[in-house]
Amino acid sequence: MPVFKNEDNGTWYVMARYVNWKGERKQKCKRGFATKKEAQEWERMFQLQNSSDLDMSFEAFTELYIRDVKNCLKENTWLTKEHIIRTKILPFFSKLKISEITTKEIITWQNEMLAYRDEKKKPYSQTYLKTLHNQLTAIFNYAVKYYGLKENPCHKAGSMGKKHADEMLFWTRQEFQTFIEVMKDRPASYAVFMTLYFTGIREGELLALTPSDIDFEKKTLTVNKSYQRLSKEDIITTPKTSKSNRTIPIPDGLCTCLQEYMSHCYGLQKDDRLFPYTKSFLYHEMEYGCKASGVKRIRVHDIRHSHASLLVEMGFSPLLIAERLGHEKVQTTMDTYSHLYPNKQVEVARQLDGIMP
């Protein structure tokens, strides 16, 4: 039995021997168990993990999933996934054997998620419920594909939530004009929201902009990086997808706005962050502007939707909008904004009438 007691402090430890993926014999020591039983359970799960035996607990398999998947994702993406796994999935499934989890357990978990209410009696949003279900499904898909699990119980249970919200919030041109008017005495915020509204870039893309990304002669803004605040550190990463790397033509009014803002940024260098703030700053300024102007409260990300709706209203094609927003596929644009296009069908019919003999 590879479980021993540390006589100095009364805790237990494990000396586990195993064969790694190269066929090499290895030994792993794990210390600090309060009881012999805890040490034995850890050793049992460790050996099951190394033998890829699906008799292991869901929690033990999840550690395998994390080990295999974590390094393939951007840090901010992984942190979101990990939070969901640790707080919404593991508390329910951790002690169950992954091979014995059935559709019944999945449906029970779904019902718990659907029944959740926060301190304001609000449930999880439909899109968040969809995200939770997708993450659980991904773990079981991984078990099926790489560890020989017979089937994914999530498939029979059916999905939960919706990919897109029933109602997309965005501002009309008039609402944005009302909002931005009250921000004129806050130069940084004014420049921030003007840039977001007239380019449709993401928050992280905005916060990563540098003076060298703005070409005032060509009147373009280049997106090639993204900002994240992770573990109390400012992190600059690559954009969300390859198509997110893009150069966006910008209107004269935005050029003037940015030039005015930059002229008051003392000592600003070409590779400094143009807006040295965090997403929290954006949220607080958004809150202020909405209260001061009286326009409806939307999320900062919804300004991106406002830009897209403006382009739809102006008659631009989904392909052009997809390129401007940095969507990987035009289908993403259509899926997200298709509900804005029916109003254009009447215009199509009217213009066809105009050319009929």
Image: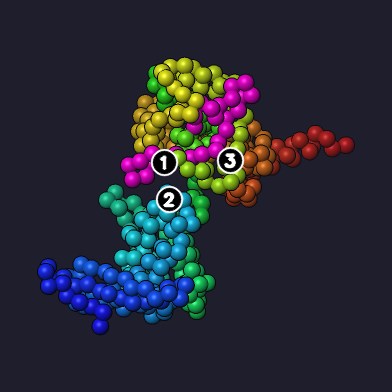
- Image coordinates of residue 21 in percent, x first then y, are 46, 72
**Residue type highlighted by circle 3:** Asn
Say few, some or many: other residues with alpha carbon within 10 Å of mark 2 (under 14 / 14 to 19 / 20 or more).
some
Q: Which residue is mark 3?
A: 245
**N-terminal label among 3 and 2:** 2
Q: Where are the magenta residues, as a range?
A: 209-234
* Rendered-image quadrant of the N terminus: bottom left
Residue 75 image label: 2
For the residue labelled by badge 2, is the local secondary structure a helix, a strand or a loop? helix
Q: Are marks 1 and 2 in contact (CB under 8 Å)?
A: yes
Q: Position of residue 299 (x, y in %)?
A: 43, 39
- Residue, x 49% and y 32% (percent of image)? 209
Crowding near pointer 3: few (<14 within 10 Å), some, many (20+)? some
Residue 219 highlighted magenta (yes or no): yes
SS at circle 3: loop
Name the spot of residue 262 as percent of width and height, x first.
47, 20
- The CA distance from mark 1 to mark 3 is 18 Å
- Mark 1 or 3, nearer chain start: 1
Q: Label 1: state its secondary structure.
A: strand
What is the three-letter code of the residue carrying label 1? Ile
Q: Is residue 352 left or right of residue 31?
A: right
Q: Does the CB distance between marks 3 and 2 fall below 8 Å?
A: no
Q: Which residue is mark 1?
A: 235
Q: Dividing the image into 4 quarters, which one contains the C terminus?
A: top right
Q: Residue furthest bottom?
A: 1
Q: Is residue 192 visible?
A: no
- The mark that comes first in sequence, 1 or 2, is 2
Q: Residue at x 29, y 49 (%)?
A: 120
